[in-house]
Image (cartoon, coloured by chain):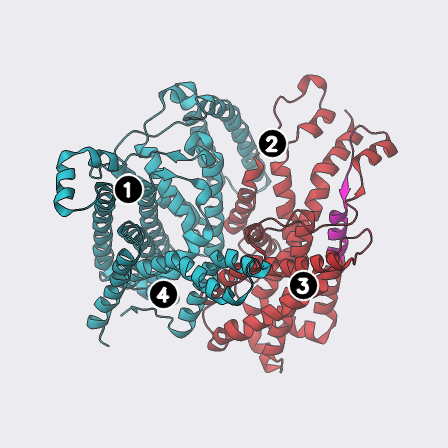
Amino acid sequence: MKPAFKNPLLFGVVFALIVTTGFMQSWTVALKLLNMGLISAIMALGVNMQWGYAGLFNVGIMGFVALGGLGAVLVSMPPVGEAWSAGGARALLALGVAAATIGAAVALWKRLRPGPKRGLLLTALLVAGFFLFRWLFDPAVAAIEAVNPAGTGYLGGLGLPVLIGWPVGGLLAAGAAWIVGKTALGLRSDYLAIATLGIAEIIIAVLKNEDWLSRGVKNVTGIPRPFVVPYEIALQRSPWFLSRMQALGVDPVTGSSVAVKLLYAVLFALVLLALIWLSQKALHSPWGRMMRAIRDNEEAAEAMGKDVTGRHLQIFVLGSAVVGIAGAMMTTLDGQLTPGTYQPLRFTFLIWVMVVVGGSGNNWGAVLGGFLIWFLWVEVEPIGLWLMNVITAGLPEGSALKQHLIESAAHMRLLTMGLILLLVLRFSPRGLIPER
Amino acid sequence: MDLLNAFVALANFVLVPAISYGSQLALGALGITLVYGILRFSNFAHGDVMAFGTMVTILVTWWFQDMGVSFGPLPTALLALPFGIVATMALLVGTDRLVYRFYRRKKAAPIILVMVSLGVMFIMNGLVRFIIGPDDQRFADGLRFLIKARDFKAMTGLREGLAIKTSAGITVVTAIIVVAALFWFLNRTRTGKSMRAFSDNEDLALLSGINPERVVLYTWMIVGALSTIAGVLYGLDKSFKPFTYFQLLLPMFAAAIVGGLGNPVGAIAGGFVIAFSEVTVTYAWKKVLVYLLPDSLEPDGLVQLMSTDYKFAVSFAILIIVLLFRPTGLFKGKAV
């Protein structure tokens, strides 16, 4: 089949799957699928930049998603004035001291000649800086977290529109990516994978434990919606909306929930389209050709005078920023930041399956993979449960094996996703929509 | 100043836990480093291989306990261990035949193999959760302590007690035996020598008539044994939870890289470096300092450098430092 015919067909199939869910289950489920599909597609797009354009293996997607979510919180939540006056300034000063210590250590390392003197000075500086930091930081944190711990107990955000939080989330993720990339790029390709695995665990640990920043496992709830998306309650009270729903013959409660999800879908689709447009432009520009040249033969590209490590750092940061934006969007959609729910299998490896299945190196492929794999991830569970019920139908009611099998059906997802990944890598490594 | 009590407190809370945790990490890192040295990729499925081996061991342990078989004061799991090892070897050799061999023949880039190992990890993780569930399982039985804190105090008359768990003792003894056997195998036997030759220079090894498939087969079998032993020891010492085993991947990789990927001695050293740093950084030093400092200087806080929730940050920090200053590891590894 020609790509011009096949690709729209594939997208049509995925769209039909979602519409079928709408008819079979409910429209709210279908729209939820669509919204998370859009977000997954953006994440896949970001990962595809790293893997598809440049061959960089990022195993820490979860961390960048979570940082994006933090960005949304820090921008949109109202500031907690009391907490700021209790210890905000001191906490910021402490963080400043920490940053200054690291900066000074780097400068020291570069200025002094190698030798035991340099090592001693560096150690002394770092130890002193650490204790100064803790001396400033600990009381500030205690003071902040003591302010109404059940309700706030954190500094809050800036109280700005959440839409500003999306690019800010991207920036946070880009910053973390820069730190990782700066150290791990230019070495063996596996090192980046291991370093990203580590940074993701640490970001999640910070979000879980630094209550002054993100309320930790107490979660931040009630993140304000973007101004274009009204609340369901407000819709149900608006006479204009009620008359509309009456004209359509739809229950206003269902109608309001569908309307809100549709508005989100439009918003997310706009972001996705903008990002695809930019990525396509970039991929077909001289810059994109250079990237692929580097990916296909690093030595040759280096011999042509291309700065391989520099370009890798650039694309790694860009891709992570896109993932961060998606993370901020997801937190906005959920209306809450729940650090306890970030699981590597869901947020890192699932995105990888999306990219590989869709077609690495092709932006449309990544987007298709995002929708398709998200659909499967959600639907495999009920299908697995149904399958288990069918398989165990012959077993006597109340048998331990039957109960165990039905309870374990939830873990079918992991098996299925792993199997899909392996099968695609083996038999169709270029994915559904291959790179041209 | 009370050096003796300070030392006992240090031994009780830092030295003993770090030595047993370090041995467990070292065994895990050895598996990673062997796969890296011979098959030339970073095996992300290693944590879940450990979980699989431990799971089989736990199931057999439960079966033994049901039948009333026990190992006296030692945990029954030690009797079940060989079953776990054999099952894991079979799983790994089967995975190699079904999955990895294809890419090896094709001479695929290492990064593709890393990705494939990610898929394998997914499947093994699902398998383990499917069979035993995602929850915590405790399977240690037998004597709990070699030395109890109270007995130690009565014996020595010191204020601080020293408790040594049976699992810690078993860990250290087993680790020493396993490592000795491994090095004997690698340095003295024909197969071991061919494995080292293959790891040093693949082309030369092939030219001198070494059968690569045989080398790979033995590697997977050794890795299966090492990872199952590491997993069971860790499970006996703490507890078994599939997700914890996945998370062990980071400290194990850090240990392998610190020592130099592909270098078995380095993996052992790396395991202890990571374990000692993790324990010392997250330990609340107040208890030791109370004995060392005069009363006037007694610390107010716990003198804990970092909360235990950040233990992964320690492995990560060490990893970053090594990558920045000595990417080949402390002992010379293969990778640059």
The three-letter code of the residue at mark 4 reads Val
Label 2 residue SS: loop
**Residue A149 in which image quadrant:** top left
B77 within the magenta span: no
Label 4 residue SS: helix
**A351 versus B218 height, above or below:** above
For image coordinates 47% across by 46% down, the residue present is A199
In the image, B79 versus A208, the foreground residue is: B79
| Other-residue count near label 4 (Cα within 10 Å), few / some / many at <14 / 14–19 / ≥20 | many
The residue lying furthest to the right in this view is: B155
Give the Cα separation between the discs numbered 2 and 4.
Answer: 46 Å
Magenta span dominant secondary structure: helix
| Residues tagged by mark 4 and mark 3 found on one chain of the structure | no
| Residues tagged by mark 3 and mark 1 found on one chain of the structure | no
Residue numbers of the magenta segment: B160-176
**A76 versus B325 height, above or below:** above
Image quarter of the N terminus of chain B: top right
Chain B's colour is red
Q: Which residue is mark 2?
A: B304
The three-letter code of the residue at mark 2 reads Gln
The three-letter code of the residue at mark 3 reads Gly
Q: Position of residue A234 (x, y in %)?
A: 22, 33
The three-letter code of the residue at mark 1 reads Pro
Q: Which residue is mark 1?
A: A167
| Other-residue count near label 2 (Cα within 10 Å), few / some / many at <14 / 14–19 / ≥20 | some
Q: Which residue is mark 4?
A: A357
For image coordinates 80% across by 28% down, the residue present is B159
Give the Cα separation between the discs numbered 2 and 3.
Answer: 39 Å
Give the Cα separation between the discs numbered 4 and 3.
Answer: 34 Å
Chain A's colour is cyan
Q: Nearer the viewer, mark 4 or mark 3?
A: 3
The earlier-in-sequence mark between 4 and 1 is 1
